[in-house]
Image (cartoon, grey):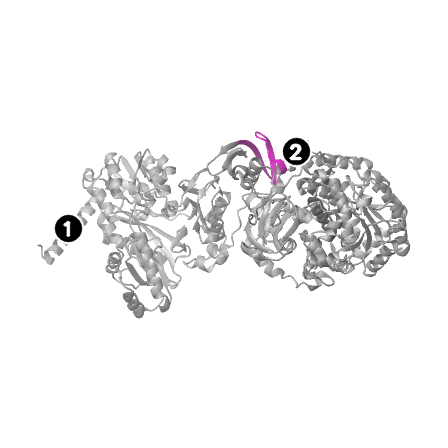
Amino acid sequence: PMSFQTRKRSALGLLAIRRVWSMTRSAHTAPQTLEYKPIKKVMVANRGEIAIRVFRACTELGIRTVAIYSEQDTGQMHRQKADEAYLIGKGLPPVAAYLHIPDIIKVAKENDVDAIHPGYGFLSERADFAQACVDAGVRFIGPTPDVVRKMGDKVEARSIAISAGIPVVPGTDAPISSLQEAQEFSNSYGFPIIFKAAYGGGGRGMRVVREYEELEENYQRAYSEALAAFGNGALFVEKFIEKPRHIEVQILGDKYGNVIHLYERDCSIQRRHQKVVEIAPATQLDPHLRDRLTADSVNLARQVSYENAGTVEFLVDKHGKHYFIEVNSRLQVEHTVTEEITDVDLVHSQLRVCEGRSLPELGLKQDKIRINGYAIQCRVTTEDPARGFQPDTGRLEVFRSGEGMGIRLDSASAFQGAVISPHYDSLLVKVIASGKDLPAASAKMSRALAEFRVRGVKTNIPFLQNVLSNNQFLNGTVDTQFIDENPDLFNLKPVQNRAQKLLHYLGHVMVNGPTTPIPVKAKPSPIDPVIPPVPLGEPPVGFRDVLLREGPDGFAKAVRAHQGLLLMDTTFRDAHQSLLATRVRTHDLKRIAPFVAHSFSNLFSVENWGGATFDVAMRFLCECPWKRLQELRALMPNVPFQMLLRGANAVGYTNYPDNAVFKFCEVAKENGMDIFRVFDSLNYLPNMLLGMEAAGAAGGVVEAAISYTGDVSDPTRQKYSLDYYLKLADELVKAGTHILCIKDMAGLLKPDSGRLLVGALRDRFPNVPIHVHTHDTAGAGVAAMLACAEAGADIVDVATICPTMGHCVTCRISLEKVFDYSEYWEVTRGLYAPFDCTATMKSGNADVYENEIPGGQYTNLHFQAHSMGLGNKFKEVKKAYVEANKLLGDLIKVTPSSKIVGDLAQFMVQNALTRAEVEERADELSFPLSVVEFLQGHIGIPHGGFPEPFRSKVLKSLPRVEGRPGASLPPMDFQVLEKQLRDAHGDEITPEDVMSAAMYPKVFQEFKEFTRTFGPVDCLDTRLFLDGPKIAEEFEVELERGKTLHIKALALGDLNKAGQREVFFELNGQLRSVLVKDTVATKEMHFHPKALKDVRGQIGAPMPGKVVEVKVKQGQQVEKGQPLCVLSAMKMETVVNSPLSGTVAKIYVTADSTLEGDDLILEITE
């Protein structure tokens, strides 16, 4: 064997020969043919974006390209971008396929490949792969195997740097193999320290340790991560440099010893040691430091005779000291930014150097390399920043990229329909922006990212946009702690994705039918309403001007002083509540609103909010009631708005804490509400006073409403006598109401009674404006209103569809305009054909004088009766309503008391019970929940008290509420509620949302979930909303002003294995498809057993509906009258109680089961 001296001499001799040779070579004196071997065919041993980048360079140089792909990558774009593509690693896991050297070499040899480009990642820094290529006679486009090995061995790379005089971070010389060595190092150098995997990078196996207690845990974690990722758990320990900048220098060497640098890149913006945004050149870098960094990099490369492209990485601390970290002996992901600022194509250079060209031949001399402007690269990945950058997978339903001047896109498989697999890196596309300076490049990048539309998977684009708009990023220098120290980068602006969500909704309706329950099989009319013309400019001044100028008191005086009768238009609320099951959508109200503002500016008010419309908007129309108020207010600035406030029940059916009612009125007033019509369903004064106080405190006009029932002109019916109403009015006027209202919700006020009541009130309160509201159930509404007006009423209610406006043209309103208005509503009404009460009810009915059913409920009951299979028994339901009212002690019937009477009536018909039977069996029947709660005192105390002994028999030992129900409720904590909502639904929660959730927690939750899935369905026209489009139908959807979607429904696919159908649309001229679960097809045929009437222990459903909760378990002992389960149907909840004592033998239902009447719920054995 050669002695050390001889070895040293021969090495020196070799070096000298090489030096001389390289000098002559660079002076072009040596014959070129020796080294220059053109490449004809290149294989890229990689996938995705980098494979495509290299193929493009090869094609530009006239070189044929070969791709390899794993079994999981058959759909990948890189396979199609190459001239030839071959499968490798058959039967291997996804990543292992690309690491299978024998397969790769075999494909290369079989297909006459001259050279292999390894890309980045996978085998790019594996010396054994570089060697395998050389051994097979295939060129490796990169450094020599020996250099790859040296640079890949971090210990050797470090010692080479030290011998070249380059500063390094204090650390162990060799990989450590035990915790003890890590402890010794930390004792010498102190904390913080960092563990790094010895045999790989990419952030895996990296752990920072700040104190002794964390050492062992982090050592174990880093070791197992490195072992899993690289097959070797060996680790280095280094001193951890706090908050450094990560700056790397691009180098390029040839086979002749020439090395140049192409300046630096700043890759400090990292997350878990993975680069997120890269910039070239580094901002605010001291020129001396730049010189030191580039000189050290070139020195190091020369030290090892580096050839081809590589990167030398440094950390720069806060004091401007730099430390060598490592060399990446390959092309890097971020090579693009260097290309943009130096105009050097690095992949071309790699290929040419590999062929044997020298850098000077390629025109690459150090003095020719100049920095020109700035470039930024963003890696757009399918990672969800909101979930710790967890990779998201799925199908790209939509993909549109941002392009244009100064933007370069290096993409992988980003196209509509591409499937993002969980097997590989989540990179979708690299976006590179260039500009004369960093702000210019950032502006281009922000613009390009804003143009992107990626749907179907989450991306990090919102996060990248936050980085690009961050002041520190734009104006200062960033270090590797930038992301950790700026948590606001994670305040992500939600991606709206409105168009795709609406397609999902339309597809859902096309496959599964309407989302809102529809009682009759009628279809919306095909005719669109014509909006009458509206003049340009502001609408004329109306009564709201008086209110804004003079406040509620001045407004009331002006109303009282007004000559002639004033009208309130109820078409926007109560009229459609009565006639169309409250189903009219904001979409149709908005279209006619400007016409009302211009044509009927002298209306007292428009009633357009509150009452049942509040929860129905969310529950059935899937729209926000507050948005309705805001939009109508903007369109009708001149006419006062009126809402219906159910006293202490606000807009709900239950009692709320007092502060919730006050807050609700305050938010309603802020959103444009003017007049609060406050009533209580039992005329229970304490509840009314609370509502009046809340409306008044909010700055609204208080209109206290007396709910009217009975007949003041009938001497035989004196429970609700004239004296009763006058005494109540005294209290309300004393409490400070601005306006007094008679709310005749059932249309019971006959002309005679109207004259008597209004006349008496006018005499008693000459200065208080009087407002009368009725329903035209019996057909005498107009006569009654005219009688009230004669007796001194100041305002009456009209609608284009209730007591008609046309009959009240005495009120200085243009008849021509009324006709136009009526025609709009007449045609619009056709769109709601499935909900129109005239679908099931053909005329007015005077039987209302007997049953006293409120107008809104009359049609609703009809609707409920049909949906619960009692359509043929509606007459019985009406008779039962009379009996139920008597059972409960003759109540005033308006929401919610009317609902209680209605629930009891339907219960009686469903179970074929007479009034006497109900009274007799009151202690064992499962009454609807609303009836039980009423008897407990949940909505207040009725005039004349509760019915006895009925109440005691029903309640048994249940608790009773004494006095005003809301008084005993603890105040609601809105801050806590808001936080809960933000946690559940994100930060776009508004104060209005908080109030919606306070009133209807479950309905609001379901509404938010619906809009998250289906988007802003309130933009759709009504026919589409209810019935979906027909195949080949073309239509437009206006998302917002100036943003219109053009959609055409193309086809419905067949059922697939997952029970879905693909629905195809054309959206703005592009093909889009959505997968929709077919709910009918996926339901197995399931027949529910019925309860046998003659078996005492079989408990059947008292009505059709959904199981809300099961209150008992199998084997449980139950007492007679104990609650077993809760059912819900059409807003009506019923608790099913046990008719006997015994043991629960078997339960046949679960929460959410849908039942028909008499379906078996459970069996009890005695």
Q: Secondary structure at mark 2?
A: loop
Residue 178 seen in this snapshot: yes
Query: Extreme bottom residue here?
Result: 187
Closer-to-camera residue (779/1144): 1144
Residue at 44% from the left image edge and 52% from the top image edge? 389
From the image, which quarter does the C terminus lie in? Answer: bottom right
Instruction: Say the numbered circle drawn on residue 14.
Output: 1
> Tags 1 and 2 in contact by the CB under 8 Å rule?
no
Q: Is residue 237 above or below residue 865?
A: below
Range of the magenta residues? 1026-1051
Q: Position of residue 982 (x, y in %)?
A: 56, 55
In this rendered view, identify the residue nearer to me: 232 or 561. 232
Mark 1 lies on a secondary structure that is helix
Nearer the camera: disc 1 or disc 2: 2
**Label 1 amino acid?**
Leu
Q: How far is mark 1 from mark 2, CA to CA?
A: 93 Å
The amino acid pointed to by label 2 is Lys
Q: Which residue carries the number 2 mark?
A: 523
Which disc, if any, is residue 609?
none
Instruction: Residue 471: give x, y in percent of width and height.
Output: 49, 56
Looking at the image, residue 431 sits to the left or right of residue 512; the answer is left
| Residue 436 visible in this rendered orientation of the protein | no
Relative side of 803 to 1127, left or right: right
How crowded pointer 1 is (Cα within 10 Å; few <14, some 14-19, many 20+) is rated as: few
Decide which of 586, 381 is in the foreground and name it: 586
Q: Quadrant of residue 343?
A: top left
